[in-house]
Image: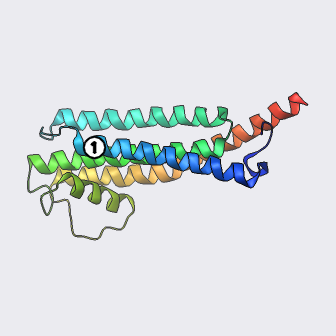
């Protein structure tokens, strides 16, 4: 197996690696969702919450940089990139879902209807996917600004982070090719 690019592996091995990456990604998503739905969120949306959202987004940037580095060093960079992308997107979505849930709890008029955790996650995903059904609408200046921040952040996440991870995959594949060439 060593010295082969992902595409050069036998089909059975590739399927096993893909299944492992999908299962790990699903496990990470399940753990993050479990935390989102079970951790206490009783507080109001305050300046501290806004600061925590900002710090969370900065931490996401650090995680993306760390993930890119891990992808370049991985034995199977493509599989590692799948896992990194799932984790990055989940963290992004859950940061905003938490913010929306706390915002709606503090100010019932912040959105067109009260937001449970599930509703906040649903709203976050519709904004991220640019679907915007219109069933939940931000109504206050703060909720509109946070939603706008999510829209811009989502575009950055899709464009920039995907580019960073794809470049990391290419570097990882080149590194593996160099390593394989030196072993012969």
Q: Measuring 34% from the left and 35% from the top, which residue is drawn there?
A: 56
Q: Measuring 33% from the left and 62% from the top, which residue is drawn there?
A: 126
Q: Measuring 19% from the left and 32% from the top, which residue is drawn there?
A: 48
Q: How many labels sit on residues?
A: 1
Q: Nearer the viewer, residue 69 or 2?
A: 2
Residue 50, above or below 120: above
Name the residue carrying label 1.
36
Q: Is residue 118 left or right of residue 21?
A: left
Residue 83, percent across and down? 53, 44
* Res. 167 image quadrant: top right
Q: Is residue 22 left or right of residue 56?
A: right
Circle 1 sits in a helix, a strand or a loop, which is it?
Answer: helix
Residue 125, above or below 37: below
- As drawn, the residue found furthest toward the top would be 183
Residue 86, percent across and down? 47, 48
- As drawn, the residue found furthest toward the right would be 184
The answer to whether residue 116 is seen in the rendering is yes
Q: Is residue 168 left or right of residue 111?
A: right
Residue 174, percent across and down? 76, 39
The answer to whether residue 88 is seen in the rendering is no
> Can you say which quadrant of the picture contains the C terminus?
top right
Residue 16, percent across and down? 64, 49
* Res. 53 image quadrant: top left
Mark 1 Cα within 10 Å, few/some/many (few <14, many 20+)?
Answer: some
Q: Nearer the viewer, residue 103 or 81?
A: 81
> Can you say which quadrant of the picture contains the N terminus?
top right
* Res. 80 image quadrant: top right
């Amino acid at each position: 197996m060593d010295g082969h690019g992902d595409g050069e592996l036998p089909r059975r091995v590739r399927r096993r690696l893909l299944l492992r990456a999908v299962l790990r990604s699903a496990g990470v998503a399940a753990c993050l969702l479990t935390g989102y739905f079970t951790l206490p969120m009783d507080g109001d949306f305050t300046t501290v919450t806004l600061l925590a959202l900002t710090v969370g987004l900065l931490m996401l940037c650090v995680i993306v940089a760390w993930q890119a580095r891990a992808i370049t060093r991985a034995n199977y960079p493509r599989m590692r990139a799948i896992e990194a992308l799932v984790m990055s997107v989940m963290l992004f979505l859950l940061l905003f879902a938490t913010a929306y849930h706390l915002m709606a709890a503090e100010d019932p008029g912040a959105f067109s209807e009260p937001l449970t955790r599930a509703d906040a996650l649903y709203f976050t995903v519709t904004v991220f996917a640019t679907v915007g059904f219109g069933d939940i609408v931000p109504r206050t200046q703060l909720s509109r600004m946070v939603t706008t921040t999510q829209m811009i952040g989502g575009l950055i996440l899709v464009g920039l982070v995907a580019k960073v991870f794809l470049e990391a995959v290419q570097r990882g594949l080149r590194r593996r090719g160099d390593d394989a060439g030196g072993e012969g």
